[in-house]
Image: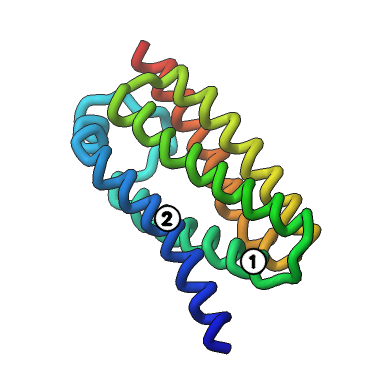
Amino acid sequence: MKKTWKTYALWIGIAEAVGALAGILTRDGTRLYAVSVLKPPLSPPAVVFPIVWGILFALMGIGAARVSLTPDSALRSRGLRLFLLQLAFNFVWSFLFFSFEAYALAFVWLVILWVLILMMTLTFGRVDRSAALLQIPYLLWVAFAGYLNLGVWLLNK
């Protein structure tokens, strides 16, 4: 039981730390974005993003913990590598979009991120079905983020 608790804390902590660090390091860019960038219809208010991302990072971490607690296998290892890879892509996207305002590159990066999330989710599903289901909100949110990113790119050329 103790190992289980520590495993969940570790994976959730990793995911949340990556999200928090990206948020802190791109804070100036996000403030500038909030006031000076034209946004597409359906853009949520700025307060929504940290709430949604906090929940999504927790779900990611829970899924990774569930997978890490399964018996060692090639699929388990692949799923956890994909988890870490997509987390790194997620981290870098924040800089491309908010700090560098490279909206076109950020959109392409986000498409790659979405594919990585899909691959991770499918791999998780072969190891632990619940871990995969926990990733569906993330997959949907990143698809919505793709719409927002594309809209910002087109509106701010």
Q: Around disc 2, counting alpha carbons within 10 Å, would you say few (fewer than 14), some (14 to 19), or many (20 or more)?
A: few
Q: Nearer the viewer, mark 1 or mark 2?
A: 1
Instruction: Give whichever of 42, 89 is nearer the camera.
Output: 89
Vertical position of residue 13 compared to residue 106: above or below: below
Instruction: Identify the disc placed on residue 157.
Output: none
Disc 1 versus disc 2: distance between alpha carbons?
24 Å
Q: Earlier in the sequence, mark 1 or mark 2?
A: 2
Name the quadrant containing residue 52. bottom left
Q: Give the amino acid type for the residue marked by disc 2 in the picture.
A: Val
Image point 47% across, 63% down: which residue? 58
**Residue 24 shown left or right of residue 10 in the figure:** left
Which quarter of the rendering shows the N terminus?
bottom right
Q: Position of residue 35 (x, y in %)?
A: 20, 32
Give SS at disc 1.
helix
In the picture, measured across the screen, residue 20 lies left or right of residue 11, that is left
Q: Which mark is residue 52?
A: 2
Q: Nearer the viewer, residue 69 or 140?
A: 69
x, y percent for residue 109: 52, 27
Indicate the quadrant containing the C terminus: top left, top right, bottom left or bottom right: top left
29 to 154, vertically: above or below: below
| Secondary structure beneath label 2 | helix
Residue 60 position by quadrant: bottom right
The residue at the point 31 percent across, 23 percent down is 100
Please tell me whether residue 122 is drawn above or below residue 38 in the rendered image.
below
Where residue 26 sits in the image (x, y, percent)?
Answer: 27, 38
**Closest to the observer, 28 or 36:** 28
Place of residue 112 in the rendered image (x, y in percent of width and height, measured from the top left): 59, 30
Residue where numbered disc 1 is placed = 68
Callout 1 amino acid? Ser
In which quarter of the view is residue 28 placed?
A: top left
